[in-house]
Image (spheres, grey):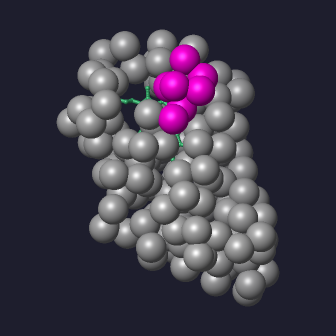
């Protein structure tokens, strides 16, 4: 569960990202593929070059899903249920990769919204992204 202070910080940053999901998401993915090249193997069917449409589209999808979760903090499991099925049953992404992506999302958000990214917001976002990851890997078996 999230405290009122955590909720405010998470929703505050999500509202800053709103409208810029493609750009923020594409940058987070670019950082992921640059820092952790092994993650590229899951996306061999996409064009991962800088500024590509695929990066923006997929990055936007990821950030919009995170925005949905931010607005359903009491029920993230339900809000991400379909996505959880997809990652666990179809994509079968190694769970270790989620830490790398959420790290890159955190760094990207920190750079773009540095005023909102207080230590309290940092800790709340880290906790929130861990929760999102745990939901997305919860249906593995
Ligand atoms: C697809 C979100 C983590 C690999 C997707 C989609 C979303 C999403 C919204 C599109 C689903 C659809 O088309 O219906 C997320 C979120 C994550 C996460 C919120 C964690 C914060 C990861 C990780 C990997 C990964 C860590 C692998 C390194 C994929 C792949 C697809 C996908 C391969 C299919 C892409 C395509 O073919 O267009 N994800 N994802 N995801 N995700 Fe994730």
- Identify the residue at horizontal 54%, vertical 32% (top origin): 32
Q: Position of residue 141 (x, y in %)?
A: 70, 25
Q: Position of residue 132 (x, y in %)?
A: 63, 52
Please state if 65 lies on the left or on the right of 137 as rendered.
Answer: left
Q: Main secondary structure of the magenta part?
A: helix
- Identify the residue at horizontal 41%, vertical 53% (top origin): 24
- Identify the residue at horizontal 33%, vertical 24% (top origin): 48
Q: Which residues are magenta?
A: 31-37
- Identify the residue at horizontal 44%, vertical 34% (top origin): 30
Q: Is residue 35 magenta?
A: yes
Is residue 95 positioned above or below 108 on the image?
Answer: above
Closer-to-camera residue (17/51): 51
Is residue 111 positioned above or below 8 on the image?
Answer: above
Q: Position of residue 125 (x, y in %)?
A: 68, 63
Q: Is residue 141 in view?
A: yes
**Which quarter is ligand 1 in?**
top left
């Amino acid at each position: 569960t999230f405290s009122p202070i955590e909720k405010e910080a998470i929703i505050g940053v999500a509202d800053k990202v709103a409208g810029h999901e493609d750009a923020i998401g594409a940058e987070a993915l670019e950082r992921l593929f640059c820092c952790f090249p092994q993650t590229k193997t899951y996306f061999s069917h996409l064009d991962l070059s800088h500024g590509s449409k695929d990066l923006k589209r997929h990055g936007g999808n990821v950030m919009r899903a995170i925005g949905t979760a931010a607005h359903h903090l009491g029920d993230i499991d339900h809000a991400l249920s379909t996505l959880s099925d997809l990652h666990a049953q179809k994509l079968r992404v190694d769970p270790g990769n989620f830490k790398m992506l959420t790290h890159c999302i955190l760094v990207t958000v920190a750079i773009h919204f540095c005023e909102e990214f207080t230590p309290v917001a940092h800790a709340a976002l880290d906790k929130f992204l861990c929760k999102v990851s745990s939901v997305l890997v919860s249906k593995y078996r």
